[in-house]
Image (cartoon, rainbow, N blue to C red):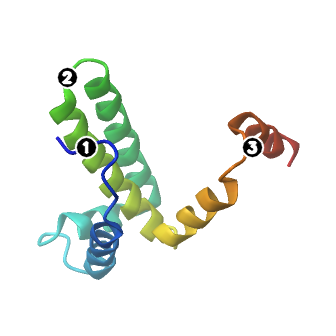
Amino acid sequence: MNDINAPINAAVIQRLFDTILARRGAAADTSYTAALFEKGVEGIAEKVGEEARETINAALGEGKERLVSESADLLYHLFVLWAERGLAPADVWAELERREGTSGIAEKESRNKN
């Protein structure tokens, strides 16, 4: 396993997202990603939920390697959902940056007021 303090390689994330975008419109019988896009936002969102449940199960008792694997699956499917809805990782990173330095409690309260 990698060191928890190891830097994140943003290039890996961008390459994955670019690959996902490139698969949009491909034949569903030749690309799993294209098959997901064919299912539309509801089908993709359902798959994200399934992967989230598998990630939770791994965290609760299936070991670190399984948690890493399921987390990767979850991120991949989340990226497909973002692409389907016209988002990019940079959109989410900007929101995280906006929240940086804000208490989680204060941030959550600000959402409840809107």
Q: Amino acid at mark 1?
A: Asp
**Which of the two discs, 2 and 1, labels the residue nearer the N terminus?**
1
Q: Is residue 73 above or below residue 92?
A: above
Total residue callouts: 3
Residue 63 x, y percent position in the rendering: 19, 25
- Identify the secondary structure beneath mark 3: helix
**Which of the two discs, 3 and 2, labels the residue nearer the N terminus?**
2
Judging by the rendered image, the residue that carries numbered circle 1 is 3
Q: Residue at x 19, y 63 (%)?
A: 32
Q: Is residue 61 above or below residue 40?
A: above
Q: Residue at x 43, y 60 (%)?
A: 81
Q: Amino acid at mark 2?
A: Glu
- Of badges 2 and 1, nearer the viewer stands 1
Judging by the rendered image, the residue that carries numbered circle 2 is 62
Neighbourhood count class around disc 3 (C-alpha, 10 Å): few under 14, some 14–19, many 20 upward:
few
- Identify the secondary structure beneath mark 2: loop
Inter-mark Cα distance, 2 to 1: 20 Å
Judging by the rendered image, the residue that carries numbered circle 3 is 107
Residue 103 x, y percent position in the rendering: 72, 39
Neighbourhood count class around disc 2 (C-alpha, 10 Å): few under 14, some 14–19, many 20 upward:
few
Depth check: give the residue in front, 35 or 59: 59
Residue 28: name its quadrant: bottom left
Q: Residue at x 82, y 44 (%)?
A: 110
